[in-house]
Image: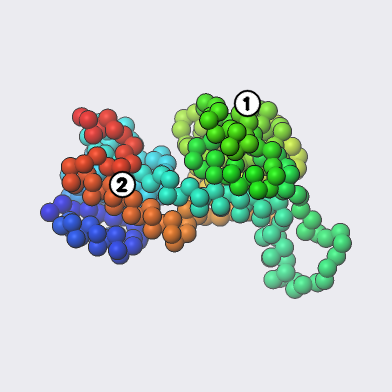
Amino acid sequence: MSKVAIMTKFFPEEVARLCAAGHLVTVHEEGGDKAAVVKYASDAEALVIPLSLRIDVDTIARLAALKIIANLGVGVDNIDVAAATRRKILVTNTPDVLTEATADLAWALLLAVARRIVEADQDLRREGFLGWTFISKHLGVDVYGKTMGIIGFGRIGQAIARRAKGFGMTVLYHARTPKPEVEEELGARFTPLAELLSASDFVVLCVPLTSDTRHLIGERELSFMKRDAILVNIARGPVVDEEALARALKEGRILGAGLDVFEHEPQVHPDLLLLPNVVLTPHIGSATWTTRRRMAALAVDNVLAFFRGERPPTLVNPEAWLM
């Protein structure tokens, strides 16, 4: 009987699947921190974690029985994958199943900022409906027919571009390598970063967090953007220099921002909390019932495959499987 430790609130039907396969499952709903992982999963062979939980080299060293980490998310920047690989520990993620929900949220943030939805909602709740006015305090900016720049053009970036076609938008994208195989289908054009920033009315960030993308958007990049442009970040918080962004927003150098991720989660830059031209959500890109159920199921699929002696379907570090 193998032990599986799940470090977050989880769907009972997925716990039942693990139990039915003969595994001993413990669920620790609050997730906790490194100390909690070591306390509750010290003898676990499989660890299922939310992306908010950091598994560093020290934690890995203290989990002697661990053989597989199933991450509930696409990005694995919360895991020291290199340290795991050295220990022959497999790392898996949950791609594909959250693509559409995350793309939807990008659009929700974009539209909310452009049309000042949150401001209008708060004003109505506070002051009541004061009547229709022609030159309203809630005048926003058009979305239809504008130019969207997408930085990072993987599954989620392409899903966002697909939605942009319905808004009659010009779509520019920047990625490590051009993707001509999808350009015609999505009506998208590969563009150097500086050109994309200067030409776009809306800039959406979809890149993974790596050493190359940390602070990809900083003071210099923000200076390239239009004064009436809107930045949306659904990638990872450290992709943006939050201090530089807050300053640009306060000084009116860009029009607004929609942020689902933050540089120092769970902390949010205090200036961003005070700005009316920013819409903030607490990392809910994949937060729909259907998507989270699919993520849980895929994580369990990975764990069950491993215990059957099969290669997990979404293995991040295949070299550990071959060691």
- Can you say whether 169 is above or below 266 in the image? above
Quick one: quadrant of the C terminus?
top left
- Residue placed farthest to the right in the image? 134
Nearer the observer, 180 or 3:
180
Image quadrant occupied by the N terminus: bottom left
Q: Is there any visible trace of residue 20 in the rendered image?
A: yes
Mark 2: which secondary structure?
strand
**In this orientation, does residue 268 appear?**
no
Q: Amino acid at mark 2?
A: Ala
Q: Is residue 244 left or right of residue 157?
A: right
Name the residue: 37% across, 49% down: 72
Dot 1 or dot 2, earlier in sequence? 2
| Residue at the spot of label 2 | 70
Q: Which residue is mark 1?
A: 192
The residue shown at (73%, 42%) is 146
Element class at badge 1: loop
- Determine the image quadrant of residue 249: top right
Q: Position of residue 205 (x, y in %)?
A: 57, 40
Residue kind at label 1, given as amino acid type? Pro
Q: Are marks 1 and 2 in contact (CB under 8 Å)?
A: no
Instruction: Name the residue: 87% across, 62% down.
Output: 134
Q: Nearer the viewer, residue 267 or 222?
A: 222
Residue 255 in the image: x percent, y percent?
73, 45
Left/right placement of residue 191 relative to residue 42 reads: right
Query: Where does residue 109 sit, x and y in percent of width and height?
Result: 62, 52
Q: How is the image coloured?
A: rainbow
The CA distance from mark 1 to mark 2 is 35 Å
Judge left or right: residue 261 versus residue 116: left
Q: Position of residue 77 (x, y in %)?
A: 41, 39
